């Protein structure tokens, strides 16, 4: 089993140039200009989530399984 990224490691990945940089995409369920904007990015076996209005403030990294559970609870 892979160890989860530490916060410092994940910041380095998110800010690194080149092909390893994640491709963030805005959720189709984000609220437009209402301030409810979420972006997600795939990181191999993990999913990163951040606030699109404040991307520099940090992000949350979940395993794909935990992300699926989160989506189930949000629906």
Image (spheres, rainbow, N blue to C red):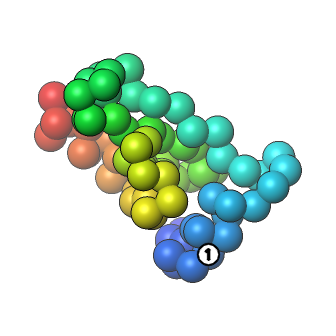
Position of 73 relative to 5 (above/below)? above
On screen, 30 above or below 51?
Answer: above
Specify whether 62 is left or right of 12: left
Classify the position of the N terminus by image quarter.
bottom right
- Give me the residue at 36% from left, 38% from top: 38
Q: Is residue 28 visible in the rendered structure shown here? A: yes
Residue 42 percent across, percent down from the top left: 57, 43
Residue drawn at x 32%, y 22% is 32
Q: Going by the image, does 25 lie left or right of 31?
A: right
Q: Residue furthest front?
A: 33
Q: How many marks?
A: 1
Check disc 1 and report the residue beneath it: 9
Residue 25 screen position, x and y as percent? 53, 32
* Secondary structure category for the residue under label 1: helix
In the image, is 16 to the left or to the right of 48?
Answer: right
Residue drawn at (52%, 78%), measured in percent from left and top? 6
In the rendered view, would you say 1 is above or below 39? below
């Amino acid at each position: 089993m892979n160890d989860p990224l530490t916060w410092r490691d994940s910041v380095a990945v998110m800010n690194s140039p080149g092909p390893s940089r994640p491709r963030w995409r805005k959720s189709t369920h984000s609220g437009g200009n209402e301030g409810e904007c979420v972006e997600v990015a795939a990181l191999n076996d993990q999913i990163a989530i951040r606030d699109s209005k404040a991307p520099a403030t940090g992000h949350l990294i979940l395993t794909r399984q935990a992300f699926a559970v989160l989506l189930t609870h949000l629906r």
